[in-house]
Amino acid sequence: MIFLEFGLLILGLVILVKGADWLVDGASSIAKIFKVPSILIGLTIVSFGTSAPELLTSITAVIQGSSDIALGNIIGSNITNILLILGVAAIINPLNLKDNTVWKEIPLAVLAAVLLFLFSVRDYLIGSLAEIKDLFQSTNPETQVGLLDRADGITLLLFFAIFMYYAFSLAKKGTEGKVAEDDIASLPMWKAGFLVIAGAVGLGLGSNLLIDNAIKIAQFFEISESLIGLTIIAFGTSVPELAATIAAATKKEADLAVGNIIGSNIFNIFFVLGSTLLVGNIPVTFDSIGDMLVLLLVTLMLFVAAFIFSYKKISRTEGYAMLTGYMFYFLYLLL
């Protein structure tokens, strides 16, 4: 039966990603019919669509009482985005970066990772030194060390609103956040509406298939649900970003490739996690703290790579280093 569950998990991923595509195509076409500016379509519908797999997966996991999967999915997706996807993109073509990316967007991604860590260890930061010592002396990876709650979710969504204001102001000045009119399908209203409905159904069905079978696989192999979230689900929900980034790198559109990844990481913490916490609290284990520190480290490394090693550029050598780092991290999770 385990092979059936693996098959259903993969089917759930496919339906989830395809559902997001249909939803974006249908909603973008409807927006075009009503003459909504391409800037707004890019910053709202398209941005939401690329984060929809993570969002629906995380919310479904929390509703079903598998919050470890929700948190692991978000952290794992962000690590995968930087080390694997940006690494592959830099190997295909070295990535030249704009000032806004180096000085504003990457620091925002660092801020998101810092806030996630601080919210998770908040109880220890306001506690005694003895409690902090106990935290780092813990030997049980499943020990709960913190709780992400609704107040944290609201705070993250407020930061997301600030990020959207920044992105919109940037888009009004140039082309960032825009979607070319030619890239938006001109569909009849009935077909666009059908795609929106089919996409929404696909997101719901795909996320449920994904979570249900991920839980069964974790139980069968007696592994933690967070490991499933950090690996299979994180990679699967990052497939849209992988495809878009490789395509952009192949066309030597470095700004699009990097912007897609950095924007996705900011979306995942500020919007996806923030929205998920409105649905339910997420306990944080000692194991998750380690993964958060890895995320913070690789995000800081991205800033260092862009600013120090090769100014405003991610070189092919750095791309190989990122890919190697991802392989070591993946092995660390499995061992």
Image (cartoon, grey):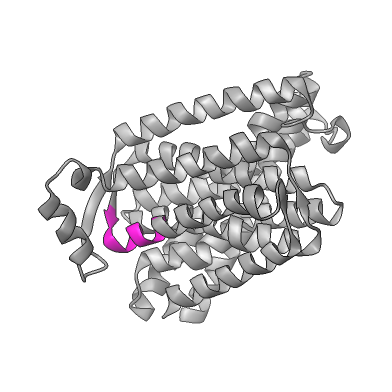
Is residue 325 found left or right of 249 in the rendered image? left
Q: What segment carries the magenta color?
A: 284-292
Is residue 23 found left or right of 60 in the rendered image? right
Residue at x-position 56% and y-position 68%: 326
130, 28: nearer the viewer? 130
Residue at x-position 37% and y-position 35%: 153
In this rendering, the answer to whether 268 lies above or below 310 is above
**What is the chief secondary structure element of the magenta stretch?**
helix
Give coordinates of residue 317: x percent, y percent.
Answer: 71, 66
In this rendering, the answer to whether 20 lies above or below 165 is below
In this rendering, the answer to whether 116 lies above or below 180 is below
Give coordinates of residue 42: x percent, y percent.
Answer: 71, 32
Q: Is residue 118 visible?
A: yes
Q: Is residue 208 visible?
A: no
37, 253: nearer the viewer? 253
Give coordinates of residue 179: x percent, y percent.
Answer: 78, 33
Q: Quadrant of the rendered structure where residue 260 is?
A: top right
292, 241: nearer the viewer? 292
Is residue 222 found left or right of 189 in the rendered image? left
Residue at x-position 58% and y-position 22%: 165
Is residue 86 found left or right of 221 in the rendered image? right
Give coordinates of residue 132: x percent, y percent.
Answer: 18, 54
The magenta stretch spans residue 29: no
